[in-house]
Amino acid sequence: MIPKTFEEFECTLSHNAPPKEWSEPLQSLWFDAKGDWEASHDIVQDLHSPMGSWIHAYLHRKEGDKWNAGYWYGRADKPFPECSLDEELKVLVEANL
């Protein structure tokens, strides 16, 4: 079942894996929220879409690679965010619900 809110998404973080029926972008965000940057990146690097680029940008921003993040924000046609990483994660999750 796909969560309807960010709070419902957060409740799934106690599970061992994201549900298979979730979209790949949402699964990628789930892994990031669980603290598994590598698993999140493994999924998103194969997503050739504006959403994939946006998540990719967020992950490199989180990693501290501002140049790489800026490249991916450009690919996603998004400005480099002023908000916190936690706020951006919430925006990304909500955009995928």
Image (spheres, grey):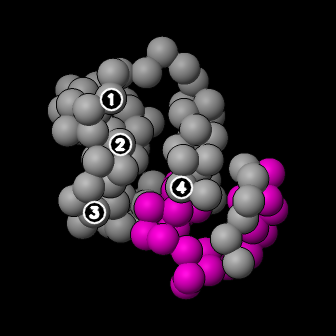
Kindly report which numbered mark, 4 or 3, lies closer to the viewer in this rendering: 4
Q: CA distance from mark 4 to mark 3?
A: 14 Å
Q: Which residue is mark 1?
A: 78
Q: Residue at x 43, y 21 (%)?
A: 81
Q: Which residue is mark 4?
A: 96
Q: Secondary structure at mark 1?
A: loop
Q: Which residue is mark 2?
A: 54
First-in-chain label (2 vs 1): 2
Q: CA distance from mark 1 to mark 4?
A: 16 Å
3 versus 96 height, above or below: below
Q: Which residue is mark 3?
A: 47
First-in-chain label (1 vs 4): 1
Residue type for callout 2? Trp
Q: Of helix, strand and loop, which mostly describes the magenta segment? A: helix
**Residue 18 drawn at (x, y percent):** 61, 75
Q: Residue furthest bottom?
A: 20
Q: Which residues are magenta?
A: 7-32
| Residue 51 is at least partly visible in this image | yes
Q: CA distance from mark 2 to mark 4?
A: 12 Å
**Residue 69 drawn at (x, y percent):** 28, 33
First-in-chain label (1 vs 3): 3
Residue 21: which quarter of the image? bottom right
Q: Is residue 63 left or right of residue 90?
A: left
Kindly report which numbered mark, 2 or 4, lies closer to the viewer in this rendering: 4
Q: Residues within 10 Å of mark 4 (few under 14, many from 20)?
A: some
